[in-house]
Protein backbone atom coordinates (compact mmCIF):
# COMPACT_ATOMS: atom_id res chain seq x y z
CA UNK A 1 0.00 0.00 0.00
CA UNK A 2 1.43 3.42 -0.91
CA UNK A 3 2.43 5.64 1.99
CA UNK A 4 -0.38 7.94 2.90
CA UNK A 5 -0.24 11.19 4.67
CA UNK A 6 -1.76 11.09 8.12
CA UNK A 7 -3.82 14.18 8.82
CA UNK A 8 -4.91 13.47 12.38
CA UNK A 9 -4.78 10.69 14.93
CA UNK A 10 -7.67 10.67 17.39
CA UNK A 11 -8.58 8.35 20.23
CA UNK A 12 -10.45 5.82 18.11
CA UNK A 13 -9.68 6.68 14.49
CA UNK A 14 -6.92 7.95 12.22
CA UNK A 15 -7.68 10.34 9.37
CA UNK A 16 -5.51 9.99 6.25
CA UNK A 17 -5.44 12.05 3.10
CA UNK A 18 -7.85 10.56 0.53
CA UNK A 19 -7.17 9.72 -3.13
CA UNK A 20 -9.06 12.78 -4.45
CA UNK A 21 -9.32 16.36 -3.36
CA UNK A 22 -12.02 16.82 -0.77
CA UNK A 23 -11.80 13.24 0.48
CA UNK A 24 -10.17 11.60 3.48
CA UNK A 25 -9.85 8.04 4.71
CA UNK A 26 -11.12 7.13 8.17
CA UNK A 27 -9.17 4.25 9.72
CA UNK A 28 -10.95 2.58 12.68
CA UNK A 29 -8.47 1.59 15.39
CA UNK A 30 -8.97 -1.04 18.09
CA UNK A 31 -8.20 1.54 20.78
CA UNK A 32 -10.92 2.11 23.35
CA UNK A 33 -10.97 5.12 25.64
CA UNK A 34 -13.50 6.43 28.12
CA UNK A 35 -13.95 9.36 30.47
CA UNK A 36 -11.85 11.65 28.31
CA UNK A 37 -9.19 8.98 27.82
CA UNK A 38 -8.69 8.40 31.56
CA UNK A 39 -9.44 4.74 30.87
CA UNK A 40 -7.68 3.12 27.91
CA UNK A 41 -7.30 -0.29 26.30
CA UNK A 42 -6.84 -1.98 22.96
CA UNK A 43 -9.64 -4.40 22.11
CA UNK A 44 -9.04 -6.65 19.10
CA UNK A 45 -11.91 -6.49 16.62
CA UNK A 46 -13.54 -3.29 17.86
CA UNK A 47 -12.43 -1.17 14.88
CA UNK A 48 -13.71 -3.64 12.29
CA UNK A 49 -17.17 -3.78 13.88
CA UNK A 50 -17.44 0.00 14.29
CA UNK A 51 -16.40 0.51 10.67
CA UNK A 52 -18.97 -1.98 9.41
CA UNK A 53 -21.83 -0.75 11.61
CA UNK A 54 -21.15 2.92 10.93
CA UNK A 55 -20.96 2.39 7.15
CA UNK A 56 -24.27 0.53 7.29
CA UNK A 57 -26.06 3.19 9.36
CA UNK A 58 -24.67 6.06 7.28
CA UNK A 59 -25.87 4.28 4.11
CA UNK A 60 -29.32 3.80 5.63
CA UNK A 61 -29.47 7.46 6.66
CA UNK A 62 -28.49 8.57 3.15
CA UNK A 63 -31.45 6.47 2.06
CA UNK A 64 -33.85 8.65 4.04
CA UNK A 65 -32.31 11.85 2.69
CA UNK A 66 -29.76 12.74 5.37
CA UNK A 67 -26.59 14.08 3.71
CA UNK A 68 -23.55 12.30 5.15
CA UNK A 69 -19.82 12.35 4.59
CA UNK A 70 -19.80 8.63 3.72
CA UNK A 71 -18.64 7.65 0.24
CA UNK A 72 -17.66 3.98 0.51
CA UNK A 73 -15.97 1.33 2.55
CA UNK A 74 -12.47 0.51 1.42
CA UNK A 75 -11.68 -2.50 3.59
CA UNK A 76 -12.42 -3.94 7.00
CA UNK A 77 -10.96 -1.00 8.84
CA UNK A 78 -11.22 1.91 6.43
CA UNK A 79 -13.84 4.04 4.73
CA UNK A 80 -13.57 6.83 2.22
CA UNK A 81 -15.43 9.94 3.29
CA UNK A 82 -15.78 13.54 2.20
CA UNK A 83 -13.40 15.80 3.99
CA UNK A 84 -15.37 18.26 6.12
CA UNK A 85 -14.65 21.12 8.44
CA UNK A 86 -15.85 19.59 11.68
CA UNK A 87 -18.27 21.80 13.63
CA UNK A 88 -16.92 21.58 17.20
CA UNK A 89 -20.26 20.60 18.70
CA UNK A 90 -21.25 17.09 19.74
CA UNK A 91 -25.00 16.71 19.38
CA UNK A 92 -26.35 14.15 21.83
CA UNK A 93 -29.91 12.82 21.53
CA UNK A 94 -31.38 10.96 24.50
CA UNK A 95 -34.56 8.85 24.65
CA UNK A 96 -33.90 7.19 28.00
CA UNK A 97 -31.86 8.55 30.91
CA UNK A 98 -28.34 7.13 31.20
CA UNK A 99 -24.72 8.20 31.55
CA UNK A 100 -23.91 11.82 32.33
CA UNK A 101 -27.59 12.86 32.32
CA UNK A 102 -28.12 10.68 35.41
CA UNK A 103 -24.91 11.87 37.03
CA UNK A 104 -25.60 15.54 36.35
CA UNK A 105 -29.29 15.71 37.24
CA UNK A 106 -29.82 12.75 39.55
CA UNK A 107 -32.34 11.13 37.21
CA UNK A 108 -32.66 7.38 37.62
CA UNK A 109 -31.06 5.32 34.86
CA UNK A 110 -33.68 3.83 32.57
CA UNK A 111 -36.22 6.61 33.04
CA UNK A 112 -38.01 7.10 29.73
CA UNK A 113 -37.85 10.76 28.81
CA UNK A 114 -41.19 12.37 27.96
CA UNK A 115 -39.65 13.63 24.73
CA UNK A 116 -36.26 13.15 23.11
CA UNK A 117 -33.71 15.46 24.67
CA UNK A 118 -31.17 17.14 22.40
CA UNK A 119 -28.02 18.41 24.09
CA UNK A 120 -24.91 20.16 22.82
CA UNK A 121 -21.37 19.58 24.05
CA UNK A 122 -18.38 21.70 23.07
CA UNK A 123 -15.88 19.33 21.42
CA UNK A 124 -12.72 20.16 23.33
CA UNK A 125 -10.77 17.31 24.93
CA UNK A 126 -8.78 19.63 27.24
CA UNK A 127 -12.06 20.76 28.81
CA UNK A 128 -13.67 17.30 28.88
CA UNK A 129 -16.29 18.23 26.23
CA UNK A 130 -18.48 20.44 28.45
CA UNK A 131 -22.27 20.73 28.07
CA UNK A 132 -23.16 24.07 26.45
CA UNK A 133 -26.32 25.90 25.41
CA UNK A 134 -27.19 27.34 22.00
CA UNK A 135 -26.31 30.77 23.42
CA UNK A 136 -22.73 29.61 24.07
CA UNK A 137 -22.57 28.23 20.55
CA UNK A 138 -23.65 31.55 18.98
CA UNK A 139 -21.63 33.74 21.35
CA UNK A 140 -18.39 31.94 20.56
CA UNK A 141 -19.25 31.43 16.88
CA UNK A 142 -18.88 27.62 16.92
CA UNK A 143 -21.96 27.45 14.68
CA UNK A 144 -24.54 30.01 13.59
CA UNK A 145 -28.30 29.71 14.17
CA UNK A 146 -28.96 28.37 10.66
CA UNK A 147 -26.37 25.68 11.08
CA UNK A 148 -27.54 24.69 14.53
CA UNK A 149 -31.14 24.51 13.37
CA UNK A 150 -30.10 22.22 10.55
CA UNK A 151 -28.04 20.02 12.88
CA UNK A 152 -30.89 19.78 15.40
CA UNK A 153 -33.50 18.97 12.77
CA UNK A 154 -31.27 16.26 11.26
CA UNK A 155 -30.64 14.90 14.77
CA UNK A 156 -34.42 14.57 15.32
CA UNK A 157 -34.91 12.80 12.01
CA UNK A 158 -31.99 10.48 12.66
CA UNK A 159 -33.41 9.66 16.09
CA UNK A 160 -36.85 8.88 14.67
CA UNK A 161 -35.38 6.66 12.00
CA UNK A 162 -32.88 4.85 14.21
CA UNK A 163 -35.42 4.29 16.99
CA UNK A 164 -37.55 2.37 14.50
CA UNK A 165 -34.63 0.54 12.96
CA UNK A 166 -33.30 -0.71 16.29
CA UNK A 167 -36.73 -1.43 17.80
CA UNK A 168 -37.37 -3.67 14.79
CA UNK A 169 -34.37 -5.85 15.69
CA UNK A 170 -35.00 -6.03 19.43
CA UNK A 171 -32.72 -3.21 20.57
CA UNK A 172 -33.54 -0.04 22.50
CA UNK A 173 -31.77 3.10 21.35
CA UNK A 174 -31.07 4.86 24.65
CA UNK A 175 -28.95 7.75 23.36
CA UNK A 176 -26.30 8.65 20.80
CA UNK A 177 -23.82 11.32 19.76
CA UNK A 178 -23.53 12.96 16.34
CA UNK A 179 -20.93 15.20 14.73
CA UNK A 180 -21.58 17.41 11.73
CA UNK A 181 -19.25 19.10 9.28
CA UNK A 182 -19.20 21.84 6.67
CA UNK A 183 -18.47 21.31 3.00
CA UNK A 184 -18.01 24.36 0.78
CA UNK A 185 -19.20 24.12 -2.80
CA UNK A 186 -17.51 25.56 -5.87
CA UNK A 187 -19.43 28.80 -5.57
CA UNK A 188 -18.95 29.18 -1.85
CA UNK A 189 -22.26 27.54 -0.98
CA UNK A 190 -22.30 25.72 2.33
CA UNK A 191 -23.47 22.19 2.98
CA UNK A 192 -23.93 20.69 6.42
CA UNK A 193 -23.42 16.95 6.50
CA UNK A 194 -23.43 14.22 9.12
CA UNK A 195 -19.79 13.19 9.75
CA UNK A 196 -17.63 11.06 12.05
CA UNK A 197 -19.32 7.74 12.95
CA UNK A 198 -22.48 6.18 14.34
CA UNK A 199 -21.54 2.95 16.05
CA UNK A 200 -21.71 1.25 19.45
CA UNK A 201 -18.82 3.53 20.52
CA UNK A 202 -21.17 6.49 20.14
CA UNK A 203 -24.63 5.02 20.90
CA UNK A 204 -26.15 3.30 23.90
CA UNK A 205 -28.06 0.18 22.85
CA UNK A 206 -29.82 -2.18 25.27
CA UNK A 207 -31.32 -5.55 24.44
CA UNK A 208 -35.08 -4.94 24.55
CA UNK A 209 -35.86 -8.29 26.19
CA UNK A 210 -33.03 -8.77 28.65
CA UNK A 211 -31.93 -5.17 29.18
CA UNK A 212 -28.33 -6.24 28.48
CA UNK A 213 -26.07 -3.29 27.58
CA UNK A 214 -24.35 -4.00 24.29
CA UNK A 215 -22.46 -0.72 23.71
CA UNK A 216 -19.31 1.00 24.95
CA UNK A 217 -20.69 1.11 28.52
CA UNK A 218 -19.41 -2.50 28.69
CA UNK A 219 -15.92 -1.04 28.54
CA UNK A 220 -16.64 2.12 30.55
CA UNK A 221 -18.13 0.22 33.49
CA UNK A 222 -16.53 -3.23 33.04
CA UNK A 223 -19.84 -4.88 32.22
CA UNK A 224 -18.53 -7.64 29.97
CA UNK A 225 -16.68 -8.37 26.77
CA UNK A 226 -16.95 -5.33 24.48
CA UNK A 227 -16.58 -7.12 21.15
CA UNK A 228 -19.23 -9.67 22.16
CA UNK A 229 -21.70 -6.79 22.62
CA UNK A 230 -20.77 -5.10 19.33
CA UNK A 231 -20.96 -8.45 17.55
CA UNK A 232 -24.51 -8.98 18.83
CA UNK A 233 -25.51 -5.59 17.43
CA UNK A 234 -23.90 -6.40 14.08
CA UNK A 235 -25.67 -9.78 14.02
CA UNK A 236 -29.06 -8.22 14.69
CA UNK A 237 -28.40 -5.70 11.93
CA UNK A 238 -27.72 -8.64 9.63
CA UNK A 239 -24.12 -7.59 9.03
CA UNK A 240 -22.48 -10.76 10.30
CA UNK A 241 -23.82 -14.31 10.59
CA UNK A 242 -24.96 -15.38 14.05
CA UNK A 243 -22.12 -16.81 16.05
CA UNK A 244 -19.68 -16.15 13.19
CA UNK A 245 -17.24 -13.37 12.73
CA UNK A 246 -16.58 -11.02 9.86
CA UNK A 247 -14.04 -12.27 7.36
CA UNK A 248 -12.46 -10.55 4.40
CA UNK A 249 -14.50 -12.40 1.73
CA UNK A 250 -17.85 -11.78 3.36
CA UNK A 251 -16.93 -8.22 3.97
CA UNK A 252 -16.13 -7.61 0.31
CA UNK A 253 -19.49 -9.01 -0.81
CA UNK A 254 -21.47 -6.86 1.61
CA UNK A 255 -19.35 -3.89 0.68
CA UNK A 256 -20.07 -4.21 -3.01
CA UNK A 257 -23.81 -4.02 -2.40
CA UNK A 258 -23.76 -1.14 0.03
CA UNK A 259 -21.12 0.82 -1.83
CA UNK A 260 -23.23 0.62 -4.96
CA UNK A 261 -26.23 1.98 -3.09
CA UNK A 262 -24.15 4.72 -1.53
CA UNK A 263 -22.75 5.74 -4.93
CA UNK A 264 -26.24 6.20 -6.33
CA UNK A 265 -27.23 8.42 -3.46
CA UNK A 266 -24.16 10.58 -3.17
CA UNK A 267 -24.78 14.27 -3.65
CA UNK A 268 -28.48 13.72 -4.16
CA UNK A 269 -29.03 14.67 -0.54
CA UNK A 270 -26.78 17.68 -0.57
CA UNK A 271 -28.75 20.88 -0.47
CA UNK A 272 -27.04 24.19 0.11
CA UNK A 273 -27.61 25.61 3.52
CA UNK A 274 -28.35 29.30 4.03
CA UNK A 275 -25.22 31.38 3.45
CA UNK A 276 -22.92 31.77 6.40
CA UNK A 277 -22.06 35.27 7.49
CA UNK A 278 -18.85 36.49 5.82
P1 LIG B 1 -11.31 12.16 18.75
O1 LIG B 1 -10.79 13.29 17.92
O2 LIG B 1 -12.46 12.61 19.63
O3 LIG B 1 -10.27 11.44 19.52
P2 LIG B 1 -11.60 10.03 16.75
O4 LIG B 1 -10.51 9.19 17.25
O5 LIG B 1 -12.87 9.38 16.35
O6 LIG B 1 -12.07 11.15 17.79
O7 LIG B 1 -10.99 10.85 15.54
C1 LIG B 1 -11.65 11.14 14.37
C2 LIG B 1 -11.59 12.64 14.16
O8 LIG B 1 -11.90 12.94 12.82
C3 LIG B 1 -12.60 13.37 15.05
O9 LIG B 1 -11.97 14.47 15.64
C4 LIG B 1 -13.69 13.79 14.07
O10 LIG B 1 -14.28 15.01 14.45
C5 LIG B 1 -12.91 13.93 12.77
N1 LIG B 1 -13.71 13.67 11.56
C6 LIG B 1 -14.77 12.85 11.44
N2 LIG B 1 -15.24 12.83 10.18
C7 LIG B 1 -14.47 13.70 9.47
C8 LIG B 1 -14.45 14.13 8.09
N3 LIG B 1 -15.34 13.68 7.23
N4 LIG B 1 -13.52 15.05 7.72
C9 LIG B 1 -12.63 15.51 8.61
N5 LIG B 1 -12.56 15.13 9.91
C10 LIG B 1 -13.47 14.23 10.35
N1 LIG C 1 -20.76 10.01 23.39
C1 LIG C 1 -20.61 11.25 23.84
N2 LIG C 1 -19.30 11.59 23.74
C2 LIG C 1 -18.66 10.60 23.22
C3 LIG C 1 -19.57 9.59 23.00
N3 LIG C 1 -19.32 8.43 22.49
C4 LIG C 1 -22.02 9.27 23.33
C5 LIG C 1 -22.08 8.14 24.35
C6 LIG C 1 -23.56 8.05 24.64
C7 LIG C 1 -24.07 9.49 24.45
O1 LIG C 1 -23.09 10.14 23.65
O2 LIG C 1 -21.58 6.96 23.79
O3 LIG C 1 -24.21 7.23 23.68
C8 LIG C 1 -24.25 10.24 25.76
O4 LIG C 1 -23.07 10.11 26.52
P1 LIG C 1 -22.95 10.62 28.03
O5 LIG C 1 -21.61 10.08 28.46
O6 LIG C 1 -22.98 12.10 27.97
O7 LIG C 1 -24.09 10.05 28.79
N1 LIG D 1 -14.79 8.86 23.70
C1 LIG D 1 -14.65 9.72 24.87
C2 LIG D 1 -13.38 9.36 25.63
O1 LIG D 1 -12.56 8.67 25.18
C3 LIG D 1 -15.84 9.70 25.75
C4 LIG D 1 -16.47 8.38 26.05
O2 LIG D 1 -16.82 7.67 25.10
O3 LIG D 1 -16.67 8.03 27.23
O4 LIG D 1 -13.15 9.80 26.72
Image: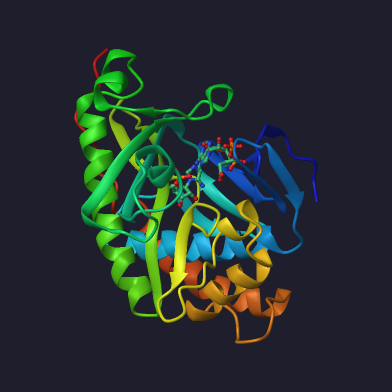
Quadrant for ligand 1 reads top right
Give the residue displayed 25% in from the left and 61% down from the top.
160
State the image coordinates of residue 114 (x, y, percent, origin top left): 19, 56
> Can you say which quadrant of the picture contains the C terminus?
top left
State the image coordinates of residue 198 (x, y, percent, origin top left): 47, 55
Residue 65, can we see it?
A: no
Taking 277 as reference, is 128 above or below it? Answer: below
State the image coordinates of residue 135 (x, y, percent, origin top left): 24, 21
State the image coordinates of residue 147 (x, y, percent, origin top left): 26, 31
Residue 254, can we see it?
A: yes
Taking 200 as reference, is 274 above or below it? Answer: above
Locate residue 212 relative to residue 97 in the image: left or right.
right
Q: Quadrant of residue 240?
A: bottom right
Q: Nearer the viewer, residue 109 or 180?
A: 109
Locate residue 3 relative to residue 242 in the image: left or right.
right
Which residue reaches farthest bottom? 242
Give the residue displayed 35% in from the left and 59% down from the top.
62
Taking 270 as reference, is 62 above or below it? Answer: below
Give the residue displayed 28% in from the left and 52% down from the top.
269
Tell how many labels.
Answer: 0
Give the residue displayed 34% in from the left and 72% down from the top.
165
Q: Nearer the viewer, residue 25 or 120?
A: 120
- What colour scheme has been applied to the protein in the rendered image? rainbow
Q: Nearer the viewer, residue 68 or 167?
A: 167
Q: Quadrant of residue 115?
A: bottom left
Amino acid sequence: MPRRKMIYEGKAKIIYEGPDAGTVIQYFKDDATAFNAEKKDVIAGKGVLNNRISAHLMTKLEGIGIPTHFIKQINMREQLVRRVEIIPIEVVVRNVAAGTLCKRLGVEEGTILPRPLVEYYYKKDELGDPLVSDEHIFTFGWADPYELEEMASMAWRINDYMNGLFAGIGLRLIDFKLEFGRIYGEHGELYIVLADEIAPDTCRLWDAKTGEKLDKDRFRYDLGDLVEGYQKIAEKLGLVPEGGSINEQMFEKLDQIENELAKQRQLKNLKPSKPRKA
